[in-house]
Amino acid sequence: MEYFGIIIGAIFVSNIVLAQFLGICPFVGVSGKISTSVGMGGAVLFVMTLATIVTWVLQYYVLNPFGLAFMQTIVFILVIASLVQMVEIILKKISPPLYQALGVFLPLITTNCAVLGVAILTVQKDFSLLEGVVFSIANAIGFTLAIVLFAGIREHLDLMEVPKGMRGVPIALVVAGILALAFMGFTGLV
């Protein structure tokens, strides 16, 4: 039951993008098409899960025992950057169209605060390795859900008549705000 709570909490209640506002850059930048959003979600899932595993192991078996916990952020960023480079190389080989569609936003996963945030939250919440993996996968699913929903709405908005001053980024930001408010309903605010 504990894992179920972690999953529901990470996807809906504390959605990394819509409730904690981490990972906004790829959320706004890559959400133009659903297919690109799904690809970005897959890349974030891969990087976030592996980063959580590697950073958890480093935190509990290297940083804490040697009194180097103050190096956490730097070490975590280096791990995430390495994993993103690996994803970039793999995508370039396996799926060049997706690699081209993600463009500059793929390397930006390195600085995606959602990935770093999940790695740090896993340590702060004192999760076991398995709980941390479940937490990271659920957060990646929440990220993907948010970005795909937003992309679907943006694709639909392209077909609608939007007032000239609201076209493009302004209407996208309004929709993102409304989407975040909708997800706030899952927190049970009264």
Image (cartoon, helix red, strand yellow):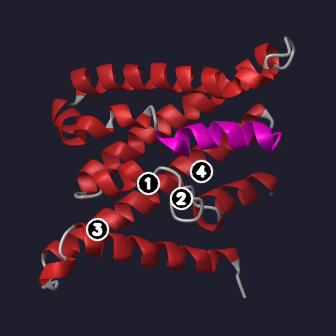
Residue 121 drawn in magenta: yes
Q: CA distance from mark 2 to mark 1?
A: 6 Å
Question: Dots 2 and 1: beta carbons under 8 Å?
Answer: yes
Residue 149 image point, x, y percent = 37, 66
Q: Earlier in the sequence, mark 2 or mark 3?
A: 2
How packed is label 2: few (under 14 Cα within 10 Å), some, or many (20 or more)? some
| Image quadrant in which you'd find residue 93 | top left
Which span is picked out in magenta? 112-127
Quarter of the image with the N terminus is bottom right
The residues tagged by marks 2 and 4 sit, at their Cα atoms, a distance apart of 16 Å
Kindly report the secondary structure that dominates the magenta region of the rendered protein.
helix
Residue 65 in the image: x percent, y percent? 87, 14
Quadrant containing the C terminus in the rendered view = bottom right
The residue indicated by pointer 3 is 152
| Residue 156 lies in quadrant | bottom left
Residue 21, which numbered label?
Answer: 2
Amino acid type for the residue under numbered disc 3: Gly
Relative to residue 141, is residue 82 depicted above or below? Answer: above
Residue 9 colored in magenta in the image = no
Side of 60 relative to 154 (left or right): right
Residue highlighted by disc 4 = 138
Q: How far apart in space, not on screen, are marks 4 and 1 (Cα)? A: 18 Å
From the image, state whether disc 3 or disc 1 is nearer to you.
Answer: 1
Disc with the residue nearer the chain's start (3 vs 4)? 4
The disc labelled 4 sits on which kind of residue?
Ala
Q: Residue furthest bottom?
A: 190
Q: Which circle's residue, 3 or 1, is located before the other in the chain?
A: 1
